Image (spheres, rainbow, N blue to C red):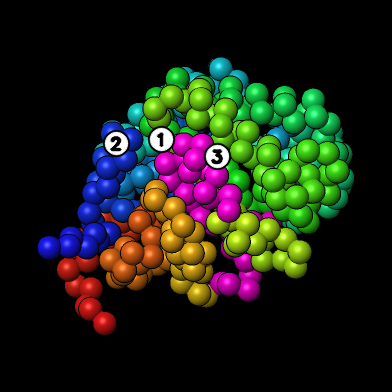
């Protein structure tokens, strides 16, 4: 007999048990300290959010002051932050959830008022929702940032996280390298798909090397939703390469369009079609996301095999008990 999984079923991966298929996606809480340190407010926030879900992906954490996006953004850029991050991972795991932290560099979306200089990016072109036209990165810059991702991943492991997520979506640095709109380089880091994907794949390869057997997730910006941008066919191609490098889960979201494209608002599960297309080409779990508020709809996505995990963000911000209530009410979901 074939067993069809549901939202409430556990999922084992890399020796970790996710007690169900619900995910808290990385959402900026803007409740960290001046230097990106963990605060009591942040610990309370994640303590509440971690009940009744299988996986918590902590919000985008900046790997260097030059790649900072928000004034109260969480940081993972220096060793002095490890102690606070250890408290954060402990709070999440004490609630029974698997704890992962997202690593990010804003690139051309970094805030000049916070970093004290012009941001840099693959090319000196405007980045959607950015603050300033960035400076083009040199090759030395590229390899230096690669090392910053590596060092941040090491800190995540030291802080007790079960894994890391590399942020390759929402118009931040890695997404900027991948998109033909923001990457017009003529060296080996630009031009063709192979060139534009070189740096992102280097980051993933290096992070996998230093975190050992920990969980590795990649948030992929599967479509820029802009003419001439990164598209789903590119995302499928990239996804296969990511799997080959040891990525364990693909977290499918938007590219330069961001996490909440205005043209898709009001459509529940607006990024699910992208996740479903990618899932057909990989043998690892795929997370689907996009304005999901109905537990029965989330359960249906799992049962129909469209995705393996469902991320529910804003509904949890509105009601931190959403996950508990969702799991408890699945029995009331009627088949169509």
Q: Is residue 60 above or below residue 336?
A: above
- Which is nearer the N-term, disc 1 or disc 2? 2
For the point 83% across and 39% down, the residue is 187
* Position in image of residue 38 (x %, y %): 50, 30
For the point 58% across and 43% down, the residue is 167
For the point 52% across and 75% down, the residue is 266
Of residues 21 and 113, which is closer to you in this image?
Answer: 21
**Residue denoted by label 3:** 166
* Position in image of residue 137 (x %, y %): 82, 35
Residue 61 shows in this picture: no
Q: Please tell me the numbered disc located at residue 232.
A: none
Q: Which residues are magenta?
A: 237-265
Question: Which quarter of the figure is the N terminus placed in?
Answer: bottom left
Disc 2: CA contacts within 10 A as few (<14), some (14-19) or many (>=20): few
Res 307 → quadrant: bottom left
- Which is nearer the N-term, disc 2 or disc 3? 2
Among all residues in the image, which is located at the extreme left? 1
For the point 24% across and 59% down, the residue is 5
Q: Please tell me the numbered disc located at residue 215.
A: 1
Q: CA distance from mark 2 to mark 3?
A: 19 Å
Left or right, 226 with reference to 19: right
Left or right, 66 with reference to 18: right
Question: Which quarter of the figure is the C terminus placed in?
Answer: bottom left
Disc 1: CA contacts within 10 A as few (<14), some (14-19) or many (>=20): many
Disc 3: CA contacts within 10 A as few (<14), some (14-19) or many (>=20): many
Judged from the image, the secondary structure of the residue bearing numbered disc 1 is strand
Left or right, 123 with reference to 144: right
Of residues 320 and 11, which is closer to you in this image?
Answer: 11
- The answer to if 249 sits in the magenta stretch is yes
Q: Please tell me the numbered disc located at residue 16.
A: 2
Q: Is residue 76 above or below residue 320?
A: above
């Amino acid at each position: 007999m074939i067993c069809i999984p549901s939202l409430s079923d556990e999922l084992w991966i890399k020796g970790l048990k996710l007690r169900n298929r619900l995910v808290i996606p990385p959402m900026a809480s803007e409740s960290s300290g001046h230097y990106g340190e963990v605060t009591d407010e942040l610990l309370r926030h994640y303590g509440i959010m971690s009940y009744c879900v299988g996986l918590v992906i902590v919000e985008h954490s900046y790997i260097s002051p030059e790649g900072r996006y928000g004034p109260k953004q969480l940081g993972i850029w220096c060793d002095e932050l490890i102690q606070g991050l250890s408290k954060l991972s402990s709070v999440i795991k004490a609630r029974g959830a698997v704890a992962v932290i997202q690593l990010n560099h804003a690139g051309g979306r970094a805030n000049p008022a916070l970093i004290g200089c012009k941001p840099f990016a693959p090319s000196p072109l405007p980045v959607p929702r950015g603050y300033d036209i960035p400076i083009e990165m040199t090759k030395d810059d590229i390899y230096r940032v690669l090392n910053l991702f590596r060092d941040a991943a090491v800190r995540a492991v030291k802080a007790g996280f079960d894994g890391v997520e590399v942020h390759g979506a929402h118009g931040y640095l890695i997404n900027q390298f991948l998109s033909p709109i923001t990457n017009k380089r003529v060296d080996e880091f630009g031009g063709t798909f192979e060139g534009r994907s070189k740096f992102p794949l280097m980051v993933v390869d290096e992070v996998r090397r230093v975190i050992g057997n920990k969980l590795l997730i990649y948030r992929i910006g599967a479509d820029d939703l802009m003419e001439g941008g990164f598209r789903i066919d590119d995302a499928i191609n990239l996804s296969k390469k990511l799997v080959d490098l040891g990525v364990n889960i693909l977290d499918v979201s938007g590219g330069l369009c961001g996490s909440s494209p205005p043209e898709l608002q009001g459509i529940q599960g607006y990024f699910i079609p992208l996740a479903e297309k990618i899932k057909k080409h990989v043998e690892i779990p795929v997370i689907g996301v996009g304005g999901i508020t109905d537990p029965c709809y989330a359960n249906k996505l799992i049962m129909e095999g469209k995705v393996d995990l469902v991320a529910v963000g804003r509904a949890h911000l509105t009601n931190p008990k959403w996950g508990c209530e969702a799991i408890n009410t699945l029995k009331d979901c009627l088949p169509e």
